[in-house]
Image (spheres, rainbow, N blue to C red):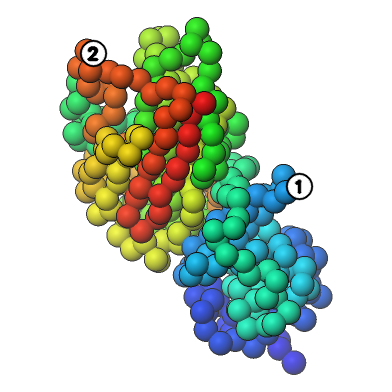
Amino acid sequence: MISRRSLMRTVGVGAVGAAVVSPAGVIAKESALSGKNSEPHQMPTNVTLLSIRHRDGSETLGVKDGDAVIDVRHAAKLLGIGAPLTLDQLLQDGSAVRLAALIAEARSSPTAKPAIVPESGITYGRLFKNPGKIMCVGLNYKRHAQEVNMPIPKQPVLFNKYNNSLAAHNCTIKLPPKEISYKMDYETELLIVIGKTARDVSEADAPKYIAGYCTSHDFSARDLQLETGGQWMIGKTLDDFAPIGPYFVSADLVGDPHNLKLETYVNGEVRQSWKTDDFIFNCYQIVAYISKHWTLAPGDIIFTGTPHGVIVGKPKDQQVWLKAGDRIESRIEKLGTLRFTLA
């Protein structure tokens, strides 16, 4: 019989790819398939995750496994194993041990075979639907600050988005009427995902609180942002103005987040191409700074700013704003390519 203590040792978060004793019976007795986590809070490691949008409109967690995806909800039902069914739940409940147990069982059990599907056949859902906070850092690349003729900030410039702006990989962003806004601009950004409660943490300790990273896009209406009294939030949080995806990659698989290449393509043409080593405030400094002002909670997300090359940074006679029909790609090394279309 597997004791609770031995289960925790055997099915550690890092043991996703290892041979483990099946904990299905233990976990099934402790919780329903999507019930509250009863184990100590753990951040996910050694995983690349995505969201699957189903025909009924629901969006649930998937695990990228080579070219295939483990449909967590389907696998949990087939195996009778309790598991987090969304990325929000996984992070907020700290239920990485339960996810690791399900992954190990799904890989080894013929019962779960119907829940393992080709990634090419899925529709991507929103990675995040209900984060507690969506925070953004403006002017966080040296050359970007220079191109828009603004001084290098002495502290991180913070603003926010809301949940209505969250959108999925391969989404279509419906642009507002031109009388509301027409100066649409791109901003590929590295997204920090918080995995543990952080309050007044040091820069040195900040990595311990980061669960992982994503490719993200801070889509922007520059006229609303800059021509209505400097209201950054209104220019950044229209519906679907924060596509994220296709993947959440755990921090251990990313390694150093401060040497990643970022690129933006518009209709196949490269517009931005730089690296995160141009940060003014790096990921760890950002987490430490924010945590000194308010508590960061598991599942909170932070957009870290965009490099130079944006439309607003060009001379006015060269500013050709994005329009309906344009296809945008945001690529970040190790994190995948986020795609969306304007309509």
Q: What is the number of the mark on residue 27? A: none
Query: Could you tell me which residue is drawn at 42 percent across and 22 percent down?
Result: 323
**Residue 106, image x, y percentages:** 65, 76
Amino acid beneath label 1: Asp
Q: Is residue 290 left or right of residue 9?
A: left
Residue bearing the label numbered 2: 316
Camera-side residue of 82 and 291: 82
Number of callouts: 2
Q: Secondary structure at mark 2?
A: helix
Camera-side residue of 108 and 40: 108
Camera-side residue of 328 and 163: 328
Marks 1 and 2 close (CB-CB < 8 Å): no
Quadrant holding the N terminus: bottom right
Residue bearing the label numbered 1: 56
Query: Could you tell me which residue is drawn at 58 percent across and 83 percent down?
Result: 9
Q: Quadrant of residue 279?
A: top left
Amino acid beneath label 2: Lys
Q: Secondary structure at mark 1?
A: loop
**Residue 45, image x, y percentages:** 48, 68
Query: Could you tell me which residue is drawn at 65 percent across and 73 percent down?
Result: 102
Q: Is residue 272 left or right of residue 210?
A: left
Q: Quadrant of residue 221?
A: top left
**Residue 252, image x, y percentages:** 40, 66
